[in-house]
Amino acid sequence: MKPVSKVEIIIDSLEVESVVKLLDEVGVSGYSIINNVNGKGSRGVRTGDVFTDLFQSSYILVVCEEKMMHKIVEAIRPIIKKFGGICIVSDVIMRIHRK
Amino acid sequence: MKPVSKVEIIIDSLEVESVVKLLDEVGVSGYSIINNVNGKGSRGVRTGDVFTDLFQSSYILVVCEEKMMHKIVEAIRPIIKKFGGICIVSDVIMRIHRK
Amino acid sequence: MKPVSKVEIIIDSLEVESVVKLLDEVGVSGYSIINNVNGKGSRGVRTGDVFTDLFQSSYILVVCEEKMMHKIVEAIRPIIKKFGGICIVSDVIMRIHRK
Amino acid sequence: MDFNLIVDNLLFPPVLFFFLGMIASFCKSDLKIPDPLPKLFSLYLLLAIGFHGGVELRKTGINQEVVLAMSMAVVMSLVVPVYTFFILKMKLAVYNAAAIAATYGSVSAVTFITAVTFLQNMGLEPGGYMVAGLAIMESPAIVVGILLARIFASDNNKKEKGSAENEEHAFSWSAVFHEALLNGSVLLISGSLIIGLVTGEDGWDILKPFTKDIFKGMLSFFLLDMGLLAAKKIGDLKSVGFFLPPFAILVPVVNACMGIVLARFIGLKPENALMFSVLCASASYIAVPAAMRLSLPDANPSLYVPMALAITFPFNITIGIPLYYYLISQANVFIPVLWK
Amino acid sequence: MDFNLIVDNLLFPPVLFFFLGMIASFCKSDLKIPDPLPKLFSLYLLLAIGFHGGVELRKTGINQEVVLAMSMAVVMSLVVPVYTFFILKMKLAVYNAAAIAATYGSVSAVTFITAVTFLQNMGLEPGGYMVAGLAIMESPAIVVGILLARIFASDNNKKEKGSAENEEHAFSWSAVFHEALLNGSVLLISGSLIIGLVTGEDGWDILKPFTKDIFKGMLSFFLLDMGLLAAKKIGDLKSVGFFLPPFAILVPVVNACMGIVLARFIGLKPENALMFSVLCASASYIAVPAAMRLSLPDANPSLYVPMALAITFPFNITIGIPLYYYLISQANVFIPVLWK
Amino acid sequence: MDFNLIVDNLLFPPVLFFFLGMIASFCKSDLKIPDPLPKLFSLYLLLAIGFHGGVELRKTGINQEVVLAMSMAVVMSLVVPVYTFFILKMKLAVYNAAAIAATYGSVSAVTFITAVTFLQNMGLEPGGYMVAGLAIMESPAIVVGILLARIFASDNNKKEKGSAENEEHAFSWSAVFHEALLNGSVLLISGSLIIGLVTGEDGWDILKPFTKDIFKGMLSFFLLDMGLLAAKKIGDLKSVGFFLPPFAILVPVVNACMGIVLARFIGLKPENALMFSVLCASASYIAVPAAMRLSLPDANPSLYVPMALAITFPFNITIGIPLYYYLISQANVFIPVLWK
Ligand SMILES: Nc1ncnc2c1ncn2[C@@H]1O[C@H](COP(=O)(O)O)[C@@H](O)[C@H]1O
Ligand SMILES: Nc1ncnc2c1ncn2[C@@H]1O[C@H](COP(=O)(O)O)[C@@H](O)[C@H]1O
Ligand SMILES: Nc1ncnc2c1ncn2[C@@H]1O[C@H](COP(=O)(O)O)[C@@H](O)[C@H]1O
Ligand code: NA
Ligand code: NA
Ligand code: NA
């Protein structure tokens, strides 16, 4: 029943590797990734097809302490500023965790 | 650090095109789509197989101002009422955006 | 405009069947499943490849009354304790539902 | 009746792979062909069978036999949904009756393909125009089913509901025709047929290793997946009641018999008569659910999909095809040819 | 000019499947080849064409003709992006001009493959080294395009922006070269070529049923998907203005003509001259977008991708290839051979 | 020893595609075969090799040689996990020792397949019953591994933990057997073997273009993906310590030698002896992780998967197979036949 932060990031699939590296560097204990996200944003529609699957996005979810959340946001800000995407944050309750 | 609304829609994959059209009409600036969602609701279990992939759903995520959120909800209400699905709304903080 | 609970579960794909069975048993009216979730947690990195797609996770989303939420959390606790994963809970507003 | 026919058909590798799939599913093995690989096989089969049919049709040309057979195909795809609808309406809601009627009036490409390979194993080759029959019979039953549902449903709940929503998302016949005539499988098979027709023997030489040589292997793979799927759908049958499972065997046999008699009347050769009766006997699990979803959203897919997939399909590819072939040999003794 | 060449080319099954795809998309049929199945076909085609080229190259060895042709290939892939860039810069922003220039300087493997099968249908077999040309021409134009963009963009906005961000994620030439030279398609085709070169006839016997016999079937499937895709991209063309669509036809023809003249100078046989001119005429929709994304993120993919995919590609595989072949036969009459 | 054997084996196209995959991965190329396409190839290989084995087994029948070889297969799949477990337990936790022991006691279908094609390139065809050996050896080692872990783990932490949770999700031997005996790959290969056995030469004629002709092409594609994967897993090896990498080469060689001696005792022909020793030498990366996850959830997959996939597998398909073949020719000189 621990209140924690939920960070949701949507970013170009090709940048996921860099984001994961940053997450590891700031020391998050866990994250989840959903690939093949289509969508629209400031750079227009982004969907995948056989040639341009480089234009798909990924959804990254991190559940962490509030302090860690701030670190994450600062770490990934340059990537999103350069390559696009969004990062939103909200409060949730962690109910079960393997620990 | 802007408080915004997060709209989550789960709807039959075949209706995504109409929903996207409506989102464009009401003027949202961005949205994301995750396909191949299985699940259960008032119409029973809905999963995909080779013949009935028409029975899968999609998850649509829109982050927007609260005012826009109300417009979206009204715009898609008839589709969900006819074809099923759900639409939930919550408050989140937009931390990074390419703008 | 009904305030409800949103339960998000991330768990090994191979356990989804058991979770769904439990959800049916406690009587939830609906749920959604997104497969092919990669990620990292207490058991290290978990991603899928041709041989080890058994190491992928699934994301399960349940929107329900608060009371039901507590039932769900109790029901799935042993599975997460044994097989890993996380379960987080937050408050959302149900805006549209087919009913 | 010659049981060797049935045994021979059962010992055909693709059919055995169907059983392997069923067994794997019953044993709760984790064997599965993940999405969208089965789609690869189904697209391949449609393309190959359409193309092959077109090439064959080019050889024979469009003669009297072709025109007669195609007319009968249309007739059957109009008659079947009507008569089954009235039987089903006695037990089921109008929507479900219409959807099941459309299912049994329409056709199954994989059943058709299995029948073609059954004939080829005996050294016979059905006329290429039969593939045109497959394409032609896919849609009319769907339109008929929806028409029946509209007519009989409007009697009941004309006043009740349907006002507010209908204004917003009114029923659209153009959407129905679009879905029925231009759904992916109809279009792929017809398009491939036309390509086969246009390119003829030259085209055949170019594509033969792909569309013919590896065909039965691809079919085996696909039937393996069908077996996995059919076994899973058998579970859904628990909730359909006692009436529908026998229906899912009897109606195909009746339809096949009607097909056999018609085929004899117009003097089709046994191999073509078999294809025609198999078209009549088979039930659709692709085009129909797609169309029903739009037109009869209240019809319950977990009624008509498992019936077609878990009962009628396995019955047809195991016992049905050799049985119909046996009946054709009998029909040729007792029934006179009317045309020709 | 001999219109039979065009008609024959259009009646080639894989090309017809391309049209079937376009028609399906225009009719808004739900026919689709779901991801990642099209990737299977594209990987297959690259592997097969690379391997085949390697085996052929082993037969001829690396002689003067090969060296001359490869040098000309490099020349063309440097010249084309430069001259097109200056034309485009008159109408477009520097970034977009550079991206389109790179697109037309680079090459399309599927156009190449269609040309190979066009020749094979006439009983001709192009030299295996041409596949090496395909691999060689993919990258240089990309590097040139980025170079041009850097040079001309820096003139404009050197002072304005680019300070804060650039420090964090600085532009990296090594990343550009990595993307240009080691992207999946270049690597797969070059690797397969080397494997073919190393294993020669023995390897060919081992893989032939896979890489040759079913090749045209796989190509048909892939072109079906390309047709679906190209038709969808035509919609995106609305926003590209009046200047670019004619560009997307004229520039390939001009490039092909330059290729034809060069090929004649070095005395290539007609079949090799066709392959060379097709390389010059084709536009890339795989390697270029991948590289642009990193290096010129401001270039708009919905300009250069639809041009290459929805205009240049269909033009080349339908009219272009037979047209270039006709022009080659004329060139052989009027232009002298310089080398050899 | 005849190094030509190794060179010839390395110049075999499928093996070269394995290296191409490794190189692509080392260069950080973006070449990848997206999911679930690799599954298509792996399912295909299992189906084809099982079916082929069944057809061959039908020809020879189940004679004394078959029974002897299968018995030896069972013996080896019981002995290997036991002896390796006690070696591993000196350095590792009981759980990990048991999982690695099971990995090396079980078998790898792709290694097996590569050995078959190695023989075919020399004009030899192993007995079809060897495929049965592949199916038979997949499971026993898993059960032995779990048994060992249970016995030795219970000694240590019987009292400590395991009370509360165990009541809720108790360990279930039936689940272990189910997973070990009915996992997808065991079932597909056994099922295809039975289908081949039942349909014999007739079935072979029907499926040959699919299961034989394109086999080596599909294998090439699959090994390309295996190369990409193996190279990625090499990174994971950093954390396994100094003890395990040599283990991952020495133990397969020792197991192969034990296999060679046993094969000689029962008088197997060289081609069958090779297959038997390859079964002994290969390590599982499919069935074992699947079973361990349920039964030994504390065992660390990033120990046993990279060992099998990134060391043992590449070693076996490059140097191992020709080495074992050489050793067999030596064994036939020095070791007497005991049975037969
Ligand atoms: N307001 C938004 N709501 C949901 N997703 C968004 C939003 N804005 C951007 N995205 C996602 O982020 C991706 C990249 O956005 P952008 O960098 O703005 O083009 C888009 O393709 C969407 O998938
Ligand atoms: N309470 C719920 N929680 C999560 N997902 C739901 C819920 N209700 C419906 N869904 C999703 O929406 C789809 C359509 O629902 P329905 O229209 O009610 O059949 C289901 O298949 C689920 O994927
Ligand atoms: N803090 C977290 N935030 C997001 N996802 C997580 C987190 N912890 C675990 N997960 C997900 O749950 C899976 C299983 O976690 P675990 O059982 O801790 O290994 C991981 O592979 C992640 O996909
Ligand atoms: Na029918
Ligand atoms: Na070019
Ligand atoms: Na072994």
Image (cartoon, coloured by chain):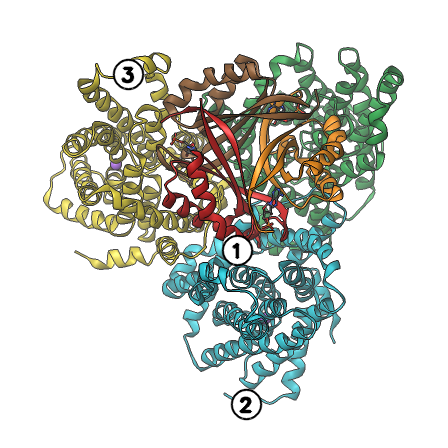
Chain colours: A red, B orange, C brown, D green, E cyan, F yellow
Q: Gap in Å between the C-alphas at discs 3 and 2?
A: 86 Å
* Chain of the residue displaying label 2: E
Which residue is nearer to you in this view: F242 or D225?
Answer: F242
Give the residue type at disc 2: Leu
| Mark 1 touches mark 3? (CB < 8 Å) | no
Residue hosting label 3: F162
Residue hosting label 1: A82
* Chain of the residue displaying label 3: F
Give the residue type at disc 3: Gly
x then y, percent, for residue D203: 65, 56
Picture quadrant of residue D141? top right
Q: Is residue F186 shown left or right of residue F336?
A: right
Please tell me the numbered disc located at residue F215.
Answer: none
Q: Gap in Å between the C-alphas at discs 1 and 3?
A: 50 Å
Picture quadrant of residue D116? top right
Of tags 3 and 2, which is closer to the observer?
A: 3
Residue hosting label 2: E338
x then y, percent, for residue F276: 25, 38
- Rendered view: E256 above or below F278: below
